[in-house]
Amino acid sequence: MRRWLVGGALIRHGDGLILVGNRRRDNSLEWTPPGGVIDRGEGLLAGLTREVLEETGLIVNKWSNRCYTVTVEAPEMGWQLKVEAWETDQVSGEVCIADPDGIVEEVRHSSALDARELLIASPPWVHLPVGAWLGGDTEPRYRFALRGTDRATARAERI
C-alpha cells in the first residue's frame, strides 16, 4: 500500500481564499487550495510552506492552525492519502508560479462564493471540507473510500 502525506494551504483572502488551477492528465483544469506531497524527511509545515512558494510565489510568514484532516483510502488501487489542511492569512511576496511539476497554471484570489463554484469539479475530498471551512464549519476529520481500479472512473464515498 503506497501512502502519501499532503499539506493543504487555506490562505485567507477577504471572505474567500487563494486557489490554484491544476492541469490534470485528462487536460481538465481542477481548482484546489495550494499544497502538495510532503517529501520524505520533511516536516509537514516546512513542506507545505515550500509547496505554497512553488505554486504561488507567496511566502507563508506564519501558520495559524490545523483546520482539518482528510484520509482517502483506495484499496483497489493500492494507495492511501492523508491530507492536513492548515490556515494562514499571513503571507508576503508576489504571485509567481514556479511549480516544478508543471501542473499549476493559474493562481486566483477567490471570494467564498467563487471558490465554492470553482471547487465543485475537484474531488469530494477537496471540495467538501474546503466548502465547509469557508462556511465556518470546523469538522476536524473527513474519511473517504475510493472504489474502483481507475481514478477516472472510481466512485468516492464518504465514510
Image (cartoon, helix red, strand yellow):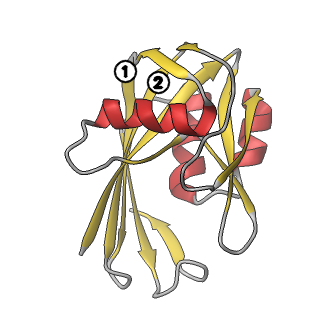
**Relative to 14, 2 lies left or right:** left
What is the distance, in whole Å, between disc 1 and disc 2 at their CAs? 6 Å
Sequence order check, earlier mark of 1 and 2: 1
The residue positioned farthest toward the left in the image shown: 41
Please, is residue 129 above or below residue 60 in the view?
A: below
For image coordinates 51% across by 20% down, the residue present is 59
Q: Quadrant of the C terminus?
A: bottom left
Q: Nearer the viewer, residue 135 or 107?
A: 107
Can residue 139 be seen here? no
Crowd class of label 2 (few under 14; some 14 to 19; many from 20; radius 10 Å) = some
For image coordinates 31% across by 49% down, the residue present is 39
User: Of helix, strand and loop, which one carries label 2?
Assistant: strand
Q: Are marks 1 and 2 in contact (CB under 8 Å)?
A: yes
Q: Nearer the viewer, residue 22 or 150?
A: 22
| Residue type at numbered disc 1 | Asn
Can residue 89 be seen here? yes
From the image, tell me which residue sits under label 2: 87
For image coordinates 76% across by 46% down, the residue present is 118
For image coordinates 63% across by 56% down, the residue present is 103
Q: Quadrant of residue 13?
A: top right
| Residue type at numbered disc 2 | Glu
Instruction: State the mark number for residue 19.
Output: none
Please, is residue 84 above or below residue 94 in the view?
A: below
User: Of helix, strand and loop, which one carries label 1?
Assistant: strand
Instruction: State the mark number for residue 65.
Output: 1
Q: Position of residue 11 (x, y in %)?
A: 57, 25
**Relative to 31, 86 lies left or right:** left
**Relative to 59, 131 lies left or right:** right
Q: Position of residue 71 (x, y in %)?
A: 35, 56
Q: Position of residue 146 (x, y in %)?
A: 44, 73
Q: Quadrant of residue 121?
A: bottom right
